[in-house]
Image: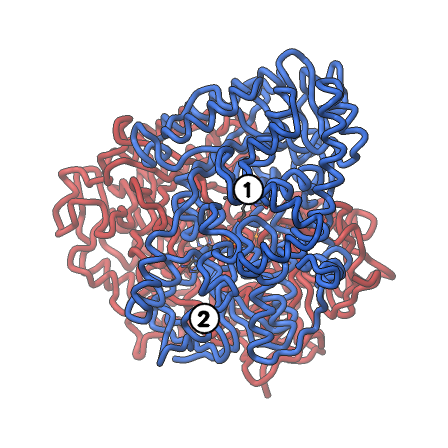
Chain colours: A red, B blue
Amino acid sequence: MGKDERFDIVIVGAGPNGMTTAAYLAKCGLSVCVLEERTECGGACETQEPIPGVRIYPHAMLMYASAAPGFEQLELHKYGFRMEWEPTNPMEAANAGLACTDGWRAISDADKLGWAKIGGMLGQPPFTRELLRATFWCPPHPSDVEVTDENTPYMQVYKKHQPDIWTPELREMTMFDLMDEHLETEPFKTGMAFAAWASGAAGHWEGVAIPAALCVQLLTLPNTGKNSIPRGGLHGYFHAIHRAAVHRGAVIRTSCPVDEILIEDGRAVGVRLRETAAAGGKTIRANKAVIAACDVHQAFLKMVGPKHLDPALIRTIKDISLKNQTLYVSVFHTKKQLTYKERFRELGEARYVGENRQPGLGIYPCDSREIYYENVRDVDGRKGQPTVPPERALWFQTPPQSFDPTDCQASYPRGYISNAFEMAVTSPDYHTEGEDALDRHKDEMDRFMRESYSQMVDGLDDDNLIHHWSATGRDIEFRNTGLIGGTWCGSRHDEDQLWTNRPLPELARYRTPIEGLYHAHQTSGHPGGLCLMAIPYNLMHILIEDGIAEPGKWWYASPYYIPQEGKISARRP
Amino acid sequence: MTQSYDVIIIGSGPNGLAAGAYLSRAGQRVLLLEKRFEAGGGLATEQVTLPEYYHNTHAIYKMMVDYAPVYRDFELESRYGVKHIQPEPQVAMPLKDGRCLCIHSDIEKSCQSIARFSKRDAESYREMRHDFARMMRHILAPQTYVPMEGALEMAARAEETELGRALSEYAEKTPQEIVFDLFEDDHVRTLMLYMACHWGLEHDQSGVSYMVPIYLDRMANYRLTAGGSHRVSNALLKCIFEHGGQIRTGAEIRRIVVERGRACGVEMQDGTHLSAEKAVVSTIDLHQTFLAYVGEENLERDFVEGLRTWEWEEWSLCNLHLALAEPPHFAAAESEPEVDRAFIYLMGYESLGDLLDHWGAMREGRLAADVGFNACFPSVHDSFQAPVGRATGLLSQMAPFDLADGGSERWLAHETREEISEQRLALLRQYVPNLSADNVLWTYLTTPADIQNKFANMVRGSYKQGAYQPLQMGYLRPNDECSHYRTPIQGLYLGGASVAPGGMVLFGPGYNCSNAIAEDFGIEKWWQELDYVTAAREEGYI
Ligand SMILES: Cc1cc2nc3c(=O)[nH]c(=O)nc-3n(C[C@H](O)[C@H](O)[C@H](O)COP(=O)(O)OP(=O)(O)OC[C@H]3O[C@@H](n4cnc5c(N)ncnc54)[C@H](O)[C@@H]3O)c2cc1C
Ligand SMILES: Cc1cc2nc3c(=O)[nH]c(=O)nc-3n(C[C@H](O)[C@H](O)[C@H](O)COP(=O)(O)OP(=O)(O)OC[C@H]3O[C@@H](n4cnc5c(N)ncnc54)[C@H](O)[C@@H]3O)c2cc1C
């Protein structure tokens, strides 16, 4: 390798956002180099083997990205992406229900209608995809454009297609407000609020009613897919993106941690690798741009460093709130299958938990929003160990998987591996007993979790349980340097940190105060966490504006995007 | 939907990657199909314990870095930053009485250590190293990277040189006889016999003892890949990508498509048809390749019968990976400080009897509590593999697939696993007292049953895809119809550990298979034969 390697674009971090950015830019004909610290790419789209041959998804597992333009624009199918998109609406399923302490509660017709309406399914034609794209796949407006009801993308979509959702208050509401207006039963609202909280934006936060509801809609909408899991899990999806990038000539270097972003005359000109990197501590130069697809703290505070940034900006970056729930993930290895308790065997559900040996998607207990608030109070208010009794702890369980042989657990011939059960707990940075509190209490927490899950299923007793594998927020954070604060999405998705405020108003358009340096990580850009291919798509608009990317005919911009004055428009003429 | 390639390679272990890299750089459109979610096969480095601790969950000791063509042909070091470390001493056998027997790359240093046990053995070792190094250079290494000759031709050729005759003599003996003839001291014999056999030779079986000189020469030539073994596979994958090759992970194959006796592609479980205009290369085991994917209907009956009698390996490995709070400090280091920095340790074999008992117990499927193992602490030599000040460790033990009490299932039982881990750690502490329970932060166990669960081709934990025994080695690996990489199915090639020269990270099968394909299809070779192979040919050794 020559001493002065040069590429048009250097990307730091090969998580889903870094790799998708690479695939987009390589497709524009740019020479791209991606540098990844770890031995494998994928970031939090990871598959682990706690026991050899037993594969589990420790982090990302559900496909939320169905509406992404990236599937078409990057031709992922050509690169081996496979997923069964389920054409039926789960809302229509006769036996759909919400799990409450005394058994399943049916979803009422009014619930189904209201939920379908919020999700754009009742439009003529349905406008679900447009709505989701407007909300997640559109770059924030330029800072000199005031955000109004008129120009907020999802507001425009509702106004056009479903005016009875549109109200002048919509942008200020909480998701509960929205649901109270359009839905009927308490269990359904509680379940959806919790799903939203676990997917990024909580049901009780003001100003995020639509992003919160749509986070859940991303999952429950009909086009999301069978059990929401692609072949090979989200890591399989990631591999298709990886192949798309490599096929277009992107160079991916693993075991290459970046220590510094090199800045000359106020311009990012490349990066310096750590001494222990596979390629040695060398410098890699970027002719056009450096893109930080690793967490916002590391990127600015360490790789760029205070030397090149305004002290006030440094302070605000330090203050970016990580306060959030984090997921405590449990996977069970059991001798016999888990079974539903007697009272959950109605509604035509299989006696075994899930027809394919796996328990089905469930949120428990959804009795009333009181339960939701009690859980929120522990996590966000008291910020400590759960004080709710195990029978009132809210949890969800990821869906059953069809026995696709490439799918994670399938290669394990003996015993049963459950899909992940997850509970929201206080994130390490905010825990009143210290950031290692959950780890210190791990045995106790594991017992607590099993007791909570045992409200609904049998089989988690000592006789049947071979192993309880669990990951705390700290485990998550340590494993993956991008998941700062031990939360799954890094920084909080509240009103102050979404859309034109993410992560800070001055950074919202993925540009930075350093010329030639852009950011593209879940912690730093709209719409934040989840493997959506959204940040890279949105960033493309900006790179086109700056004359860096010149995509071919395959490109289309968001219809709601507002070009920056004086720049090249990313919209095709 | 049909997609078309020149060559489709099944499996992306060291051999599949080598074949893919040679052929894609030769301009062929190459596709690799890998069942798992990452490429690399036995070249794996994974964070299986705690974050920032990198563990080589399969191959760790690289024995052919100085000979294998891939390192040179792809300039793995200078272009891809794949570096190797050769720690010293290479092998250390600490004893409970505080003494330690050490083998170094340097012959004289080794002799000094051996002389403390037996002066005669030191003399004998010096002579052996010289002899074995010559056999390696002139015969054994060259044979690894060319197709095997038939037994008769090989025997006739061996008769013609002095070195060849000497090697033939060894081949007739059992490993134990060779070691006993050379050495007198019990500890020296223990170390030598372990190192000669632990990759799967039976100590009392003759017929494949031409491998004893290989293993006893390589004993002083093992290397560790800086950053972990996976860097080698990642570098080869990059070579493939750079030349337009592709890989599909999570690939589920339904069958190898055979039309009119010719392999013309692969059909996937999802119905996708991948066509191979020139060749399909299988680097996985014989049963999957022929019985599951080609299908008996496309094969002669005798051939199928032969496949059914294929012997898997007698024993496999049970490995315990450790995340440690601090590097090991050996009790034996009080008298020999260099012990703390050795590469491969042998522990738990205080006498030859201990080693023979271990083999005896394995034959009966027993799992004794105090059997020995080899161990390695990679981060001591390569700081990348563990966080600053901490350490990674590996205890690697020969172990049978079937246990007398409970069969292979028992390996998967949680209680057995905990018990095994505790027993191994207890034994370790007798030699390395500082690795107390507090200093062992995490453990990760892989048993023979796990190996099979993880790699579909390592049947019954056979990490070389089949036993090393006279009827399955050399020209007979896997049989006389396939050992030249071609098979009775035109267009179907074998290129993995099941074909000569066999398993381990040698790259021999993948390299030789690439040569065969290049020759069959008139593909211009951009690579040249290795100098020492050419020399051996000219001197009549091969
Ligand atoms: C428990 C849990 C459950 C989740 N569930 C889902 C789900 O069901 N569906 C979903 O879509 N999402 C889910 N997520 C979220 C999703 O995994 C993340 O939002 C996503 O991975 C973020 O991608 P990213 O590319 O921004 O960052 P990351 O995935 O964090 O990638 C960043 C990459 O940068 C690398 N890096 C960091 N520092 C350096 C450096 N100095 N030099 C070089 N490389 C560096 C890292 O190693 C990493 O590979 C979940 C997350 C967790 C933790
Ligand atoms: C625990 C352990 C320790 C070892 N230690 C060492 C060591 O220290 N030094 C050393 O030199 N060697 C070591 N080995 C041996 C070495 O790893 C193997 O012999 C070597 O990797 C064989 O290379 P290969 O390419 O032929 O096959 P493999 O490396 O086994 O690769 C085969 C690949 O094919 C894939 N595959 C299997 N079935 C299918 C299918 N149906 N479809 C598609 N893909 C499939 C597998 O997933 C795998 O990736 C060790 C092995 C093990 C298990």
Quarter-of-image position of residue A541 = bottom right
Percent of width and height locating residue A306: 79, 47
Q: Which residue lies at the image location 47% right of the left edge and 45% below the top edge?
A: B469
Chain letter behind tag 2 = B
Name the one closer to the observer, A253 or B459.
Answer: B459
Q: Is residue A157 visible?
A: yes
The quarter of the picture where the N terminus of chain A appears is bottom right
Separation of residues labelled 1 and 2 (CA atoms) = 34 Å
Q: In this view, does B13 lie above or below B49?
A: below
Question: At which x and y percent is residue A347?
Answer: 13, 51
- Judging by the rendered image, the residue that carries numbered circle 1 is B172
Of tags 1 and 2, the one toward the viewer is 1
Does the Cβ of the disc 1 residue fall within 8 Å of ligand 2?
A: no
* Amino acid beneath label 2: Leu
Sequence-earlier tag: 1 or 2: 1
**Image spot of residue B295 (x, y percent):** 31, 66
Compared with residue A164, is residue B230 higher up or lower down, i.e. above or below? above
In the drawing, does residue A491 fall left or right of residue A375? right
How packed mark 1 is, by other alpha carbons closer than 10 Å (few <14, some 14-19, many 20 or more), is some
Residue at 24%, 34% (x, y): give it. Answer: A459
Q: Quadrant of residue A263?
A: bottom right
Query: Could one spot residue B444 in this view of the protein?
Result: no
Q: Residue under mark 1: which chain is it in?
A: B
Number of the label disc, if any, that sits on residue B492: 2
Image quadrant holding the C terminus of chain A, namely: bottom right
Secondary structure of the residue carrying tag 1 is: helix
Who is closer to the viewer here, B85 or A123? B85
